[in-house]
Amino acid sequence: MQVWHFYGAVLGLLCLIDYCICAKIIHFVPTLSYSHVAFNGKLAESFKAKGHNVTILLIDVDPNVSTGAAGNVEVHRIDVNMSNGILPATLWHNPGPFENASPLNPKIMLKLTRVASIFVQTCKNLMLDTALLTEMKARNYDVGVVEQYDMCGIGFLKLINVKSIIWLSATGIYRMQPETMGINYPLSYVPELFAPLTDKMSLMQRLLNAGIACVTEMLHKILPIAEENRIFKRLNNQKHYNLFKEASYSNLILANIQPFLDFPAPTSNNIFPIGGLTVPSQKKSKLNSQWREITDMAPFIIITFGSIAKTIEMPKEMQQSLFRSFKFFPQFTFIVKYENITKEIQKYSENVYLAKWLPQIDLICHSNYHGIITHGGWSTVLESLSYGRPMILMPLFADHFKNANVIADRQLGIIIDKSVIHKDTFTDAVEELVTNQRYSLNSAKFSKMLKEALPTDLPRLVAHGVHRSLRDSRFSQQNFRFKSADRSLWRNNSGDIFILLTLFVITVSF
């Protein structure tokens, strides 16, 4: 609560004092997926709207991913000589999104190791582009923005002498990000980003949470970080160089979260929640005539599993269960993203339409939009919730499982377990969603909360974060940075005291 009072006081002052510190901002954005690139693009547009000079550096680890940026934002796509399709072929197959995606699955461990090697090679290739490094260094950027999933961006921004770094999370917060900043995330009640758990865990669930935490941290540190540390040791001509140590000096974290839409976790005034920033508020639907004809006839439900998981690649039993459910609800129109049809939009049955691509946000803000069946991607969750509609979530991989548990815990939607599908699975879920009013009522309530999450608009909060980053970095580090960031995990968790107490008890006992 004190953090929100702090924000309110600062933002109230900014409302009274009309000033602008125009910064030169660079976004370091590997093309991991469209959702991550789009989030960076929308954030960059927000910076631009506040008068800053913004550049997006798209690192083409996957050249097929589009920019997601618009307006007057300067975008540079950097060819890093990676084989076209190697990242998606590695990341989204064997196992695929509809298979077991637990981090404890040996196949997933192997896959993450291969993905890490791709990012390491990308980083090596990028650092060979001395012309780019020289040009970026000459531009004298004030602020660098980089996501948490690959540390090469931290090293790159430090190398081109960016004055301040904003560490970004387009998803919920991954534990290693705040812990690098000195904020401890207890695994006893804070579920890992990739764990299918809530904050209420049994003994076995706490063991599972700890196991997932150990595996993901190990996979993150051993291959990519160790290799990238060696790259930047050489480039900086330093015997000791640690990217996590460099990241701990970031001025702040911008996280695509809101505290009321997440499980409780420790925080600080270095973490700015900006959940909802990238969702257009009060948007009017701009559907073309063909889409209007479909959406105006009846309440409709959208079915999409994001840009990665394709409906056509669903296991046969799962797809049959999904399409079987539609015939039991003739009062609704079902709009399904389906990738292998010949037309852009094709009528499948009396109340079912297939589409190669969905104008998702324009559908969601339509007055007849009633809900969505989707994978649990955070952007889609926020979009649907922003317009007060519930959802059926079938989490597929990564953070989807935690996102789905947050939604179910708040009674904003229903979870379907992809590993346990029978012929009535989707029918039962849709029936529960459309007949039980608590989901719609709660979604409407949380939609209002999302709009009123802060005492003023989110872009102004982000602008304040940039202004704070532009101040004297030494002052910021002395007054805002946690001293625990410089201490060992052992000391921060009082391991030394535990040993002393143990020795004392043993001594007294004998």
Image: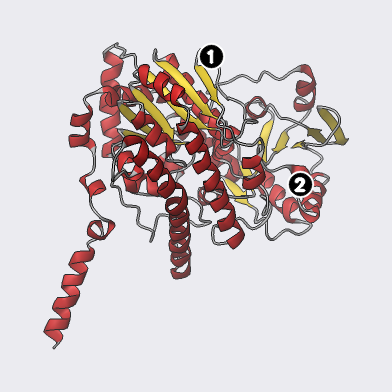
Instruction: Name above or below for residue 33 compared with residue 69.
Output: below
Q: Which quarter of the image is occupied by the N terminus?
A: top left
Tell me which residue sits at (50%, 16%) in the image.
74
Q: Secondary structure at mark 1?
A: loop
Q: Position of residue 347 (x, y in %)?
A: 86, 32
Q: Position of residue 87 (x, y in %)?
A: 61, 41
Q: CA distance from mark 1 to mark 2?
A: 35 Å
Instruction: Check disc 1: other Cα within 10 Å, few if <14, some if 14-19, many if 20+.
Output: few
Q: Which quarter of the image is occupied by the C terminus?
A: bottom left
- Residue 509 appears left or right of 202: left
Tell me which residue sits at (24%, 23%) in the image.
471
Q: Nearer the viewer, residue 157 or 314?
A: 157
Task: Name the image colouring.
Answer: secondary structure
**Badge number at residue 191:** none
Pointer 1 and pointer 2: residues touching (CB < 8 Å)?
no
- Point out the residue furthest to the bottom here: 510
Identify which amino acid the numbered label 1 is placed on. Gly
Q: Is residue 178 visible?
A: yes
Instruction: Check disc 2: other Cα within 10 Å, few if <14, some if 14-19, many if 20+.
Output: some
Nearest to N terminus: mark 1 or mark 2 = 1
Tell me which residue sits at (65%, 24%) in the image.
362
Q: Position of residue 441 (x, y in %)?
A: 56, 40
Residue denoted by label 2: 313
Residue denoted by label 1: 71
Q: Position of residue 251 (x, y in %)?
A: 30, 33
Identify which amino acid the numbered label 2 is placed on. Glu
Instruction: Name above or below for residue 54 compared with residue 304.
Output: above
